[in-house]
Amino acid sequence: MDADDRTLAGRASDGDVRAFEVLIRRYGPYMRAYSTRVLGSTDEVDDVVQESFITAWQQLPQLADLTAVKSWLMRIVSHKCIDRIRARRPHADIDDHEPHADDGESPPRRAEAMDRERALEAALAALPEQQRQSWLLREMSGLSYDEIAEELGVPASTVRGFLVRARKSLIRDMEGWR
Amino acid sequence: MSDTPYDSPHVPRIDSTGDDPTDDHPIREAPIREAPIRTAKALGFEPDELDGHTIEELSDYLDRDGQPVDPAIESSPDALLALAALRRLRDLSGSLIEADARAEPPRDDSWISGILANISIEARAGRDIPISHTSPTARLSITEGAVRGLIRAAGDSVEGVLVGRCRLEGDVTIADTPIAVTLEVAVLWGEQIPETTARLRSAVYSQLLRHTELRIASIDITVTDVQFSRAADDALVVGPDEESE
């Protein structure tokens, strides 16, 4: 269970399916968790993560730094998620994804009753879609501003703006909890 | 939940890069206490509330782990307050995805076999390595991928070592070309590395001698990891239905 990523990725890169399976079991849950957050639902998650691993298998021989296999996988799954979101955008009513601004009951008050993760979860869900995506890509996937800009098809300066607003909102919601 | 029979001993991994480099960083010692947060004025986000600093600037400062130290930030209580809040948020983000991943139900085997059914071993075949035959009309060859498989299998038969990436350097498609085999390996903690690699080298060599006609000029082994647990090898022989839990 503790075979290191580099050894496993090296074997998988050379064609060892069993080693690849160990990587799937090791990082599949992270990729699923991440996809669920980004896509906002679980319907497509199975497919997205499966596709990601198939792509990973194809591209693994080109991965120069085998020790970075985790962040590399996260990047692939981020990309697949963004593709899904782009594909669904023309059909989705953007208003459906906007937060409900129910200022009557303050999020911090409700958050107090929740544990920390649930509070962040709620605060995240309340963010506008592009802010949430930027924040997830940055904080959970570790993408750079430029990479996020490329994924979202907006200038890097816009991504910076999204992140600043996302962080302010999240902190505002979270600090009440403390 | 922690002590399943499959858990390996809780020993640190030598290649771990997950350590938080900010752990003993001076800005941890920022004069921030829990108490004032709630009672003091609300946390400010605008430059005039942050001694001229911006959230963006503070985020960047956090991203580079407070290096180089910025005295203007470090001497501003309001900026430090915001920085501490950003740090808590970041730490919490990490624990959120960890918690999410732990809460993921274990995938059934059909989900994994769905992936494995869609990947191609042929993509890893590599070059064709000729094998001579008594009949002049027959042309035999073995793929580079198959030879790598032989090398891994030979390596797996050696106690205390796990072969990672392997390369055949030299033109294997032309018979009698001197070939250098390079192997990256993980060695089990406690093994005598020179002895283990010597056993690995001879196991690989004899397999290659038996199954191929390659002229092996050298077998170069690089130890890229030291493994702390026997589980390293077990992981690769765990059947699909033997997963822990």
Image: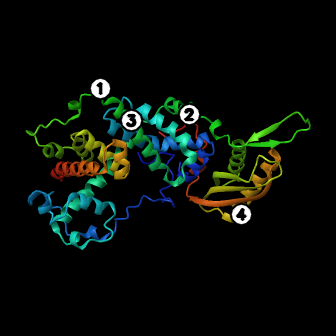
Observer-nearest of B116 and B238: B116
**Structural crowding at the residue carrying mark 3, measured as other residues with C-alpha within 10 Å and reported as few (<14), some (14–19) or many (≥20):** some
Q: How is the image coloured?
A: rainbow
Q: Position of residue A80 (x, y in %)?
A: 41, 37
Callout 4, which amino acid?
Answer: Glu
Helix, strand or loop at disc 1?
loop
Q: Are marks 2 and 3 on the same chain?
A: no
Helix, strand or loop at disc 3?
helix
Q: Which residue is mark 3?
A: A83
Question: Which mark's residue is nearer the viewer, 4 or 2?
Answer: 2
Residue depicted at x 29% and y 26%:
A91
For the residues labelled 1 and 4, the Cα–Cα distance comes to 64 Å
Q: Quadrant of the N terminus of chain B?
A: top left
Circle number at residue B116: 2
Circle number at residue B195: 4
Helix, strand or loop at disc 4?
helix
Residue depicted at x 53% and y 54%:
A65
Question: Which mark's residue is nearer the viewer, 1 or 4?
Answer: 1
Give me the chain letter of mark 3: A
Q: Are marks 4 and 2 on the same chain?
A: yes
Question: What is the total number of numbered labels drawn onto the structure image?
Answer: 4
Observer-nearest of B152 and B237: B152
Q: Which of disc 2 and disc 4 is earlier in sequence?
A: 2
Callout 1, which amino acid?
Answer: His
For the residues labelled 1 and 2, the Cα–Cα distance comes to 32 Å
Q: Are marks 1 and 2 on the same chain?
A: no
Left or right side of B126 for B57: left
Q: Which residue is mark 1?
A: A91
**Structural crowding at the residue carrying mark 1, measured as other residues with C-alpha within 10 Å and reported as few (<14), some (14–19) or many (≥20):** few
